[in-house]
Structures are given as structure tokens and as C-alpha cells.
Image (spheres, helix red, strand yellow):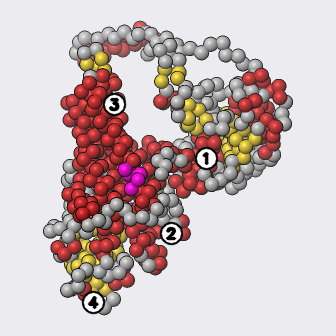
Amino acid sequence: MDFNLSPLQKMIQKTTKDFCDKEVPKIDDYMAEHDDYPPDLLERFAKAKLLGMDIPKELGGTAGNNFNMILIAEEMAKTGTTATLPLFMNNSVAETIFFWGSDEIKEKFIPSLCDGSAWATMAFTEPGTGSDPRALTTTAELQGDEYIINGTKRFISMASKPGHGVFYVKDLSLEGSKADTTALIIDKETPGITFSDHYKLMGLEGSDTCDVFFKDVAVPKDNVLGEAGKGFKILLRWIAGERIQQAAGLVGTAQAALDEAVKYARQRIVGGAPLGMMQGFTWMIAEMKTKVDACRLMTYNTIMLQDGNKPFEVPSAELKVFVVPMVQDVCRMAVQIHGSYGYSKEYKVEKLFRYAMHGGIVASSIEINKTIAGQAYLAGKSP
Amino acid sequence: MNIIVCMKQVPDVTEVKFDEHGSMIRSGLPSIVNPNDKHAIEAALTLKEKYGGDVTVISMGPPQVEEALREALGMGCDNAIMVTDRKFAGADCWATAYTLGVAIQKIGTYDLVITGQEALDGNTAQVGPELADSLSLPLCSYALEVSIDDGKVHVLQNMGTVVRELEAPLPCLITADKAMNEPRVAPMDKIMEAYQKQIITWGFDDLQGNPDNFGLQGSPTRIRKIFSPKRAKAQVEFIDGTPAEAARKLVDKLKELNLL
């Protein structure tokens, strides 16, 4: 196993940084003013070929791999921009459709996720559940060649943006069977779909996170992803990959917090010496650096399982269990090192701290991941 | 329209550190494509998109230059040539221009040679003009705009307070002003393809030039000393009074110092 990055991988990091230096300030300025994503955000990603990272070129992708994607995720997350969310989503939803979809489904839905003309969404959570398929209340009733959808999805990212998403529904045609969750690809502009206002979140400013309301929404039955009733399996695989992307992003967040803390600890003079020379702060820096390095190595290890077509669902749960508290602690210490300045919105660490807090909640809670990892080990299903 | 772009790899001086004597610590500094040369690459790629043809990027330096050439390929250049040999080491502007000139003659036919206006680490702005002289090409420096018409190149030249309109026959050498364009970021798929492409490598034996003109021995320039200028300690003066009074005093002060 070799964790040294190849010249190409280093160039991918550098190119992403170049993209961030050029584009992210403009993106963040727009988002600060409009509390929303720039309408051409995905086009900018597409122009830089940051979408469809592991999708074949015939479908509009870049034919890379997931390792490349996490290098990009880490680099972009260092900026603290919320724009990482749609970048992750368009990539991971395209990958999911590619993995489970028929050729027809792939050709119909993947190219627009790669060229940036469609905003991707993944929607499972409802007012009454975030992880239990038995508790889903959004229903799909099969009528001829169409499903009729009714219900509400909650906290859905990029929900009201034009494009399509994978929505998980209780399939009434499978009522009584053990698995009745079906994944449907739904055009978000279909008549009968409405949206709430955006939620005001603790971090991730400007993100389009809202509820989606379905009222007798007709969806072609050909839009089933995979097989009817296999929806939860599709969700679990998607979320396992999403956790790794998220972990890579969080490593970037922590690295940025560490960089800011070190810069401040060198510049701030206390009692005639830089703040960082005081043992209490020196030790904080040591802990932060160690945690960031360990998180990065574990992220690399997990993504190599995915790229190697080895089981990665449980390892990605373990990854989240490890990375989230580490990164949140690193960001907390970065705020602490900055003192009152760290508590001020003038300084980047304040934003990074709030950003890091989403890690334990979004894309599956840390508690459910502890359950997945613990139960797998108890059952002898984890090496 | 076949275009040759000359590019240099330089230390990233945004991350530069100085030792206790104020000298730049070069070891461990990351290397980057000379930012001004990215404007030259962008100009070449824009012309290629408009008029067709190929863009060949050429760079002289140690083998690490390969990384910069891969980046240029990722931006969209078609071919890359690395000119590297220990005998080329220590070259000043003249010897660099000579070496690049011999390499460009070896390439054969071309319509344009484009360079950046100057390198980040030397700031001489000499290599482009000296290369034009070496190749006996007309020179259009500090180009803000370039267009081709009827076998001629038309250039708007940035002369500071004035802009000149130039016309020259092809082939011609242009140095790109940094206000000319905004260099593109290499798209990720092209970066990946760039690492699959072959880079042509030419050494001393390949170029067949005059051995006396290469490297340190071919360099008429001798550096006697490198030093960082001493920084004068700034004096801070606080101006009292109401905002209007303070503003007036500030203006008077600036006039006194011939700054207004």
C-alpha cells in the first residue's frame, strides 16, 4: 500500500487549487449577496471537468476514479465554500445512476449531470425518519405506466434547483413485502412538486436545503433505478460513498483550520514571544496536526477500497465515526487558539467550525454509523 | 497557424522564505509555471481556437520542468518539448535565447513564437526580444491583443500611457502582456490526458549548436552579488484635528513630499 501521491495526483490537487483561487471568491461573493448558489455554478464545474469524475467519457464524464474525487474534495473544502455540496452531489448521484441504472437510464440521466445542466438531488429523509425505510410515508402508487407520488421529503439539498434526483418512496405495489422502498429518478420540475423556503442552517450558508412536497406527481415507471424494492440497498451504497467524499472534505476543512491556527500562532505575540511557543498552544498544534494526518490516511485507505471494488460500506461508517469528532476538535482548537478573534465572523476559523458541525449530521448521523460499524463487527462481518 | 510557446518553470515566490541574511531560501520551494508565461499559453490557445493549427510548448531547464510542461499540455497545448542538459546550466538571458532559438529552428516551420513578458524570478524581460533577434524574427512585445489577417499579425502593444498598433509579417515573435488575457485553468480531463502524452526531450547532442554559446560559458552576464535591499524603517505620524482638518493636513504633507 502506497500513500505517496503520484505526479498526476499532485497535479490534480494543484489544478483544483488553481480553480479555487480563480472561481471560489466569485462564487462565495455571489452566495453572500444572494443567499443562494450562482445559477451558473455547475457550468463552471463542468468547464473545469470536475463533474462525472468516475463516469466514462461516452456519457460526458472524465473517466477518472474516486481517489481523484477525494483529492478534489479536500482541496475545495479548504476554502470553506458551500459550493462543495453540489459538486459532491452531482458526482455521487451520477456514480450511483451509473452503478445501478440500465443503459437507457444511464444515457437519459447521466450526461446532464456531467455537463452541468442538471442539479442532482438525493432524497430519503422525511419529517418522521432519516434512516428507517419502514417509516417512509412518501408513497408511490402504480397506475398503468406511471407511479403517482404523494408525500413530503425533508432537508433535501439542491432540491429546488432544476434537474433530477433520486427519491426514495414506499412502493405501494410491493405492500406487504419485506423490502418496499423503491428508488425513482424524478425530474424536479414535474407538475405537482413544490418546495418550502430554504432552511437557515448553522453552516453551509446559501445552500438550497428545503422540503419537497409531492401532490399526485406522475413519474414514468421506467424511471425506477435498479429494481423496484431495492431502493434501500441503493441508498446504503450511495451514502457509503458520500461519507468518504464528506470525510475528504472534512479533512480539507481541518487542514484549513490548522493552517489558519498556525499562521495566527506565529504572528500573535504574547509576552514577547509568538503565541505558538507557549506550551499549551504548542501541544494543541501537535494534536491538530496528528489528527488531520490520521484522518487523511484513513480516508485514503477507505477510498482505495472503493476504487478496488472491495466492500467499503462498513469501513466508510468507521471512517465517519473516526473523522467527524477529530475534525470538529481540530476546528474547535483553531477557534480557541484565535481567542476572541476566533469567535468573530471576521476570521475564517469561525466559518470552518460551523461547517465542520454538519459532519456528524448530514449524510447519515454519526450515531447511525456507530451502529453500522459496531453491529457489523459483532456479527463478524467486519475484518 | 502553428505556434510555439516558450515557458519557464520558476520558484513560487509567494511561498518564499529568507534566511537571517535576507537571502532567498530556494531549496524546498515549490516550482510553478512562470505566471506571465501562462498568458502566452492562453494567447496561443485562443489563436489556435480561432485560426486552427497546433501549439507546441517548449521549456529549457532541469528535468523537473516536465511537471510544468504537463500542466501546459493540460491547458490545451498539443506538443511539449523539454530542452535539458547539464551543459545548458547557468545560462543567462542571451544563452537561454540562443538555446531556445536553436531548438525552435530544429522544430522547423512555425507562424508565431509567443513568450511571456518576463520571468517571475529574474524580471529581466530579455529572453523574448533576444530570441526574436536569434531567430531574425520581427518582435511585437507587450501585446494586449493579437489578430491575424492576410498573412500578417496585428498587435496592440501596451506602452504604459499609450497603446501602439503594430503590424508584422509572419513568422513573428510576440511577448504577451499580462493584461492580455486571463489564463484558463486546465480542465481535469485534459490534465489526466497530459500524463499519457509523450514529452520530447532534447539535450546538447540533439541541438547541434555552437558549444561555446550554451550554459554558463556562453553567458556574457556575470552576477557579482545578490542581495536584498535593506528596508528603511517606516516612521508613523499621527495627524490630529477634525476629519476635514486632518484631510487638509494630509494633502499638504503629501504635496510637501512631492507625492501629489
Q: Is mark 1 on a helix, strand or loop?
A: helix
Residue A346 spot, x, y in % from top left: 26, 35
Q: Are marks 3 and 2 in contact (CB under 8 Å)?
A: no
* Amino acid type shown at disc 1: Arg
Specify the segment rendered in magenta. Answer: A298-302
Q: Is mark 3 on a helix, strand or loop?
A: helix
Q: Mark 2 lies on which chain?
A: A
Q: Is mark 2 on a helix, strand or loop?
A: helix
* Amino acid type shown at disc 2: Leu
Main SS of the magenta part reads helix
Magenta segment: does it hold A299?
Answer: yes
Q: Is mark 4 on a helix, strand or loop?
A: strand
Residue under the image location 68 percent in, 44 percent down:
B57
Q: Mark 2 points at which residue?
A: A59
When the figure is inspected, residue B259 is found, relative to residue A18, above or below; the finding is above
* Amino acid type shown at disc 3: Val
Q: Which mark is residue A75?
A: none
